[in-house]
Amino acid sequence: MKILIVDDSSTMRRIIINTLSRIGYTDVVEGENGKSGLEKLGQGGVEMIITDWNMPEMDGLEFVKTVRGQNPVIPILMVTTNAAKEDIVEALQAGVNNYVVKPFTPDTLKEKIESLLG
Amino acid sequence: MDQSEIDALLIGGGKSPKKPKMAAKAPEAAAFPAAPSKKEPTTQAEPKKDGSGHVISELDTVTSVTERESNKVMDQLDQISRLVSRQQQLITDMMRHEGAQSLGVQGAIQEVATASKEIQDKVFEVMDLMQFQDITRQKLERIVHHLRQIHDYIAELLGTGLKSDTERPSISHTIAQTGTTPDENKAHADAVIEAFKSQKKE
């Protein structure tokens, strides 16, 4: 399964990639903002998206809305520092399937991914 | 921070707090420097002449440098992880060796294997804790946002028309709820998700 990780922090992308590899997902592609995420998505083969919210050029919310305009079914997990209730609701309304607040444990990421793929 | 970064700071206007006179030399212009590129963490912000954006410039440098240094730590952790994996493979090979089949030797090897697994777990734990870098960066972005608002307000008040640059990453609406302990917001987020999904079903 190919997973697209969109986050402007290279450290965070590495942490997510590392966590994914520990739970058996090693086929990943990376984007550093929504714009490059869309480019990677356009290259095909992506079956799941993990995206940050706060990014330059195109933020995660805009990215999710754009993706949903093209693909209503691909699972999207938002992983962000935004913890306010209204933020979580806004992301869900935009089309996010599930939501993780940073900092997270590997168990949480695993649980969320498995629930999305379940 | 290495010498090239110190030089870049001095040239680029990221004034050292120990040399306040530099900021007073050219008070005639004001513009906040652009954020350094994420791909080139050592790239300094554009030179500025009035010192008003020095704090922002330095904060941008702090976030870029810490990201670069965090990646160096991650590189080292990856290296340790690979070495531990290699060690675990050697331990497995050793256990199969015909000279190591006595109960005593097998027990000793098993202890080494357990210790090796503990090291690997700790390495993963440290990697996960490196999330602090991204969280701190976003908190600094929020502070920079407030500083820019103050700058723009004063600029407008004085009628200089010198607004700060507008192209910045989107930032958290608030940092008050940004946690530092892993999963401290999980229960809250899960409850909001559940409530949203239940509401949608109705």
Image: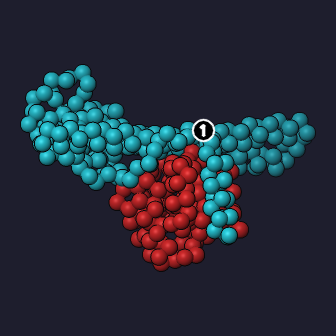
In the rendered structure, the answer to whether residue B12 lies left or right of residue A29 reads left
Depth check, front residue: B66 or B167: B167
Q: Amino acid at mark 1?
A: Thr
Quadrant housing residue B127: top right
Q: Secondary structure at mark 1?
A: loop
What is the display colour for chain B?
cyan
In the rendered structure, the answer to whether residue B110 lies left or right of residue B10 reads right
Depth check, front residue: B100 or A48: A48
Visible residue check, residue B72: no
| Percent of width and height locating residue A97 | 60, 65
Q: Residue at x 19, y 23 (%)?
A: B20
Chain for colour red: A
Give the answer, above or below, for where B72 lies relative to B191: above
| Percent of width and height locating residue A96 | 55, 65
Depth check, front residue: B85 or B138: B138
Give the answer, above or below, for where A81 lies relative to B11: below
**Identity of the residue furthest to the top in this view:** B18
Chain for numbered disc 1: B
**Identity of the residue furthest to the front in this view:** B202
Visible residue check, residue B164: yes
Depth check, front residue: A17 or B146: B146
| Percent of width and height locating residue B17 | 26, 24
| Quadrant position of the N terminus of chain B in the picture | top left
Give the answer, above or below, for where A42 lies relative to B53: below
In the rendered structure, the answer to whether residue B47 lies left or right of residue B62 reads left
Q: Which residue is mark 1?
A: B181
